[in-house]
């Protein structure tokens, strides 16, 4: 049961299955099924930005941070991207990336990929329907973090194998 609750998201026939622990005393209609946990990967950041501190900043813009995989392990870089476990509200659209300013260089686009993400709407960026059934189509461009964004299939990715992670206090487990 713990694995089902903690290791999602789970998909059934291409659709996201939202699982929640039963809250005693509530009816099914009183329970909210809106919050979903994902591991997100933040790609294309300059190497010096692959830090726990930046993971906190970026993760908090995406949702509620659950865990952060430590980017530096045993004195070296563990991955070429940040990996953050977040809880998001499925009523909001997904964020696909953001522009990163760089000193004396052009800004660079950082891509956000969601591990084990079921199909989602490429029109409005929300989980729960596809573009064919979208009543909130916003097109290809919308304001986000600090510039533009586009909802595209490459926002989905397979699960990365864990390296090391920490809780919000920076302690390894």
Image: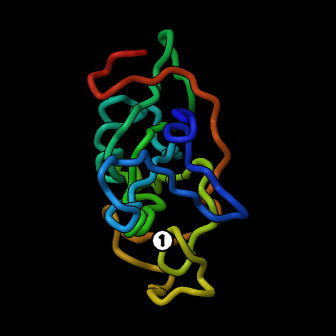
State the SS at label 1: loop
Q: Is residue 76 found left or right of 102 in the rendered image?
A: right
Residue at 64% across, 30% down: 161
Q: In the figure, residue 27 lies in which quadrant?
A: bottom left
Q: Is residue 169 found left or right of 3 in the rendered image?
A: left
- Looking at the figure, which quarter contains the C terminus? top left
Q: Is residue 104 found left or right of 110 in the rendered image?
A: left
Residue at 51% across, 68% down: 127
Name above or below for residue 11 compared with residue 56: below
Q: Is residue 94 visible?
A: yes
How far across and how far down the image is residue 55, in percent? 36, 37
Q: Is residue 104 found left or right of 149 in the rendered image?
A: left
How far across and how far down the image is residue 107, in percent? 40, 55
Figure label count: 1
How far across and how far down the image is residue 113, in percent? 55, 52
- Looking at the figure, which quarter contains the N terminus? top right
Q: Residue furthest right?
A: 13
Q: Residue furthest front?
A: 25
Q: In the figure, residue 8 lies in which quadrant?
A: top right
Residue at 53% across, 86% down: 134
Question: Nearest the camera: 162 or 75?
Answer: 162
Name above or below for residue 84 compared with residue 97: above
Residue at 46% across, 20% down: 72
**Residue identified by numbered label 1:** 126
Question: Nearest the camera: 147 or 104?
Answer: 147
Tell me the colour scheme of the image.
rainbow
Name above or below for residue 169 compared with residue 120: above
Q: Is residue 103 visible?
A: no
Specify few, some or many for label 1: CA neighbours under 10 Å numbering under 14, 14-19, or 20 or more.
many
Q: Residue furthest bottom?
A: 135
Question: Nearest the camera: 15 or 46?
Answer: 15
How far across and how far down the image is residue 20, in percent? 45, 49
């Amino acid at each position: 049961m713990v694995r089902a609750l903690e290791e999602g998201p789970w998909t059934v026939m291409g659709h996201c299955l939202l699982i929640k622990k039963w809250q005693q005393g509530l009816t099914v209609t009183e329970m909210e099924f809106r919050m979903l946990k994902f591991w997100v990967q933040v790609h294309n950041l300059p190497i010096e930005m692959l830090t726990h501190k930046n993971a906190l900043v970026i993760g908090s813009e995406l949702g509620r941070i659950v865990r952060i995989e430590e980017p530096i392990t045993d004195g070296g870089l563990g991955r070429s991207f940040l990996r953050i476990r977040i809880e998001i509200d499925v009523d909001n659209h997904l964020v696909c990336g953001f522009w990163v300013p760089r000193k004396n260089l052009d800004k660079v686009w950082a891509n956000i990929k969601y591990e084990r993400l079921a199909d989602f709407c490429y029109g409005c960026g929300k989980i729960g329907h596809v573009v064919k059934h979208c009543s909130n189509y916003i097109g290809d461009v919308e304001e986000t973090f600090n510039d533009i964004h586009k909802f595209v299939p490459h926002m989905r990715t397979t699960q990365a194998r864990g390296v090391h992670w920490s809780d919000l206090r920076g302690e390894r487990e």
